[in-house]
Amino acid sequence: MFWASYVLAALAVVLAWPAPIALSRAAWPARAPFTAMVLWQSIALAGGLSMIGALLLWGLEPLGESLTDAVPAFLGVLLRDDSAQELGVVHVFAISAASLLLAHLLFTLALTFMRIRRQRNRHRDMLALLGSPATDQPSTLVIKHPSPVAYCLPGGAHSVTVMSDGLMDLLTRAELDAVLRHENAHLHQRHHLLLWAFAAWRSALPWLPTSRLAQGAVSELIEMLADDEALRRVDESTLVRAIAIVGSGALPDTSADPLDDADGAGTGGARVRAGVSGGGPAESGTTTHRLRRLLTPLRPLNRLQQTAALSVAGLLVVVPPVLLVAPGLIR
């Protein structure tokens, strides 16, 4: 297990720093948002497994030649007071660190889910007081707000799309339909689940700069995916005008806005925003990238390139579990 722990540690370092930085700076994700999204998910999952696995293998190494031998021996130490003379201080520390890291990640994931659910319920209660159903759009609420605002509030069968009357006054019927198609794509493709997962990753490892890069990249990719879905029903020029008009608006002071959420969609909060409301530098940057992508169409990745990227994603998910059991297979 000794060599496998070193391989997992090296993989964890690569996935925690150079790999996310390289992917966040690459230009090709705009040509294949879905493929890039899969790769980001595999990096996050494989990175977590590698960190925990490296510590676990290093800590259990004195108890057996494979994980299948070491785990029963370790349980014997815990439950039957078997001798633990083989375990030194460093190994006990590694096992404890692996256990604490796993517990921390799972606890943060659950805590983030509970926080988001509470925010959504509170947001939905406010919308019930401040919003009114759209006359010609099902599952759509209209709020009185001078700025162009559009976002969706996930909630299963109770999911709704929210728009301001200021937005409806600015857009034509075709442009409004483009915005609705975009928001419905967020709901149908369950983008809020992706935001939740990467928000939990950032909350669990705030000291890791790449967790911020990953969250920002994923937020931008889901907007591109929603744009691509909207383009199946509306023409490109209509969508571009809708994004530009909505993106030109600026929300007022969020501290005085009863509908604002401090966490927002950017951290997996109560709502998934269109990313075109002009609410901050990050959203403005996303809007610019989306417009550039639509105005200057990029050639999609060819089949070989997509296959290569998806193969890398698949290997990243498979390699850590294989390394965990590999020492037992080749002894």
Image: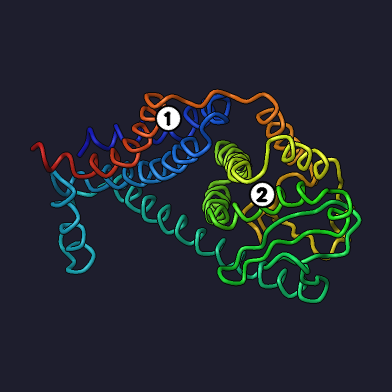
Seen in the image, is 86 located left or right of residue 221? left
Q: Amino acid at mark 1?
A: Val
Q: Amino acid at mark 2?
A: Gly
For marks 2 and 1 on the same chain, the one whose residue lies earlier in the sequence: 1
Residue 134: mark: none
The residue lying toward the viewer, choosing from 113 and 28, is 28
Q: Quadrant of the C terminus?
A: top left
Query: Secondary structure beneath disc 1?
Result: helix
Asked if labels 1 and 2 touch by Cβ distance under 8 angstroms, the answer is no
Look at 58% across and 45% down and name the residue there.
229
Residue 125 position in % (x across, y down):
73, 75
Among the 4 quarters of the image, the one containing residue 221: top right
Look at 81% across and 45% down and name the residue there.
246
Seen in the image, is 125 located left or right of residue 35? right
Coloring applied to the structure: rainbow
Q: Residues within 10 Å of mark 1 (few under 14, many from 20)?
A: some
The residue lying toward the viewer, choosing from 246 and 241, is 241
- Tell me the CA gap for discs 2 and 1: 25 Å
| Residue 207 shows up from this direction | no
Q: Quadrant of the N terminus?
A: top left
Residue 265 position in % (x across, y down):
67, 53
| Residue 213 shows up from this direction | yes
Look at 55% across and 63% down and name the residue there.
113
Residue 266: mark: 2
Among the 4 quarters of the image, the one containing residue 263: bottom right
Q: How many marks?
A: 2
The residue lying toward the viewer, choosing from 201 and 187, is 187
Look at 70% across and 55% down and name the residue there.
264
Q: Of tags 2 and 1, which is closer to the observer?
A: 2
Residue placed under numbered mark 1 in the picture: 14
Residue 174 position in % (x across, y down):
76, 48
